[in-house]
Amino acid sequence: MTFRSFILCSLPALLLGACASVEDRGPQGMLAPGDPARPVMAAVETVVTTDPEVDADDPAFWADPRDPSRAVMFGTDKSDGLYVHNLDGSVRQFLPSGPVNNVDLRPGFPAATGERVLVAASNDAPGANGVNLYLFDPATLTTSDYGFLATPYEPYGFCMGRRGDAFFLVVTTKAGTVHQMTVAAGPAGPVIGPERVLTLGSQLEGCVVNDAADTLYVGEEDVGVWRFDFDPAGPSAATEIARVDRNRIKDDVEGLTILRDREVEYLIVSSQGDSTYPVYRIQGADHVYLGRFAIVDGPVIDGVTQTDGLDAFSGPIGRFPEGVVAFHDHEDAPNPGQQNYKMVDWRDIRAALGL
């Protein structure tokens, strides 16, 4: 077990940047030699009044580029299905899709009914492994089922990517394989293209595609973070980006996400073993470690522990003028057995890390 002591600061100290850090302590109570995590607080949390035992896992944001106040956040429930939340945390819609795990989306999908946001989530239901597909209508802010892609392997992690007009599904597995395939709109529903398989050494889950850089990041839970060329015809070799060293990252590596701010790209990692989030600046082939943060108890909203999935939105969305990051929270105090999602203003993370 890892013991952590959170030392919070007063508002004046916070404004002066003098807030104390979060100290991570190992099994013997010794200070971890890694960079201490900086505390931030959540601004919004999701609230589900109809289900006392939401088994949350992974979020994904969407906002209207013409009116960022029109925005939603998708969130999986590993027992029951897919939630669609308003940005105040309330439930907008629920789709009873079964045990969906990781979720992602890409806008601009040319469906037969018109341009839609393609949303998809991995599903590891016993005897029915695959990926659930959905169409989100930006005009009505409603989501509908779009089919199910059965897989001969058990899906675990999931993300999506786009190369030009081509949309991609990416599925990771506990066996250490990554499956990349195109998905297109056919006359009778989605059509799946050829599959590219990449291999790492052990259990995988979190992944994220940087469309602009044509790269794929994958988290190998007990090892670290890897990067692949996302070109289906490109090299299949993996490049190590970050290692589980129990200083900056403590196993398990879970969710991965990318946020763009002021012409800089940041890779954010869920270090589930100590409930912290290391941040790296992406500089071409280099990834510069900038520090890490933890989400602590605030006046109204509790802190976050044991995060699986997370997602960042770059730029204005809802009440967040410069971006937001959502995190799965393993236990929503004071509601035993209930999990949910917490949203943190990117400006608070940026200030905490001095970015």
Image: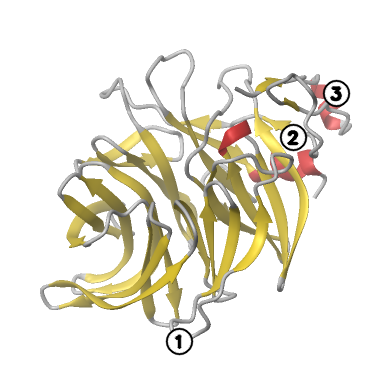
Circle 2 is placed at which residue position? 37
Q: Position of residue 198 (x, y in %)?
A: 44, 70
Circle 1 is placed at which residue position? 233
Above or below residue 155? Residue 293 is: above
**Label tally:** 3
Q: Position of residue 186 (x, y in %)?
A: 17, 78
- Disc 3 element: helix
Q: Position of residue 292 (x, y in %)?
A: 72, 42
Q: Three-letter amino acid code at disc 3?
A: Pro
Q: Nearer the viewer, residue 344 or 76?
A: 76
Q: How is the image coloured?
A: secondary structure
Between the residue at mark 1 and the residue at mark 3, the CA separation in whole angstroms equals 54 Å
Q: Three-letter amino acid code at disc 2?
A: Ala
Find residue 275 and report its image quarter.
top right
Q: Nearer the viewer, mark 2 or mark 3?
A: 2
Q: Is residue 36 left or right of residue 46?
A: right
Circle 3 is placed at which residue position? 12
Between the residue at mark 1 and the residue at mark 2, the CA separation in whole angstroms equals 40 Å
Residue at image location 60% in from the left, 53% down from the top: 224
Q: Nearer the viewer, residue 45 or 152?
A: 152
Q: Nearer the viewer, residue 161 or 242?
A: 242
Q: Is residue 11 left or right of residue 46?
A: right
Q: Three-letter amino acid code at disc 1?
A: Ala
Q: Position of residue 299 (x, y in %)?
A: 63, 17
First in sequence, mark 1 or 2: give its number: 2
